[in-house]
Image (spheres, rainbow, N blue to C red):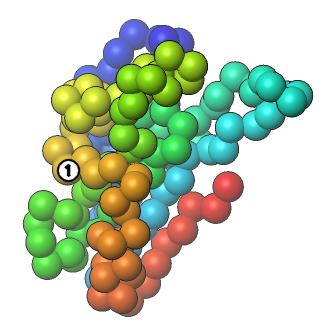
């Protein structure tokens, strides 16, 4: 950990500020930075995308934030997408956030796994009039 944990309310307020600037019926998708290889079997120390960090406080690779304030289902207006934890893989890659940990950090209650994202995101993209993408 690079710093002491922050109150999740900071990230809740940051998301509110961003959402207030969005167009009506728009969806915003923020991706984490990629892991960069330093050689054949090692990677550079991971540095999170600044926008995703500012909005969520999450510093885990392969993460996404989806903001869709006009989603017909209120549960899916703020969605954090994480890689499903796998105990065997964690021995090599390190700890992955669990739902309760991610919620405590970010203040986001709806968390879905990356391997289930396609079926969930596709209808939202079709319903939205505007799509904001944070390109790496």
**Going by the picture, which residue comes out furthest to the right?**
39
Rendering quarter of residue 9:
top left
Q: Position of residue 97 (x, y in %)?
A: 35, 28
Q: At 33% across and 49% down in the image, what residue appears?
A: 113
Q: Quadrant of residue 46?
A: top right
Name the residue: 78% across, 23% down: 42
- Residue 8: quarter of image: top left
Q: Which residue is mark 1?
A: 110
Q: Residue furthest front?
A: 88
User: So how many labels did they put on this image?
Assistant: 1
Q: Is disc 1 surrounded by few (<14), some (14 to 19) or many (20+) residues within 10 Å?
A: some
Residue 76 x %, y %: 20, 63
Please say if 19 is above or below 97: below
Residue 78 is situated, as x and y percent measured from the top left of the image, at: 25, 57
Confirm whether residue 23 shows in the render.
no
Percent x, y of residue 106: 29, 36
133 sits left or right of 36 in the view: left
**The C terminus - image quarter:** bottom right
Q: Nearer the viewer, residue 40 or 24?
A: 40
Q: In this rendered view, identify the residue nearer to me: 96 or 131.
A: 96
User: Is residue 13 something one can see in this rendering?
Assistant: yes
Side of 35 where 74 appears, left or right: left
Q: Residue at x 80, y 34 (%)?
A: 37
Give left or right: position of 80 versus 33.
left
Label 1 SS: loop
- Give the vertical position of 109 relative to 74 (above or below): above
Closer to the camera in the image, 13 or 75: 75
Give me the residue at 42% from left, 42% from top. 83
């Amino acid at each position: 950990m690079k710093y002491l944990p922050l109150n999740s309310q900071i990230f809740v307020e940051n998301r509110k500020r961003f959402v207030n600037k969005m167009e009506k019926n728009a969806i915003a998708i923020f991706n984490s930075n990629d892991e960069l290889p330093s050689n054949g079997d090692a990677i550079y120390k991971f540095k999170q995308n600044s926008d995703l960090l500012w909005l969520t406080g999450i510093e885990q690779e392969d993460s996404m934030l989806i903001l869709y304030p006009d989603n017909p289902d209120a549960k899916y207006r703020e969605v954090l997408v994480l890689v499903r934890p796998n105990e065997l893989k964690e021995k090599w890659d390190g700890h992955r956030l669990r739902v309760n940990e991610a919620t405590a950090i970010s203040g986001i209650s709806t968390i879905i796994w990356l391997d289930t994202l396609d079926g969930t995101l596709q209808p939202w993209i079709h319903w939205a009039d505007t799509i904001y993408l944070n390109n790496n």
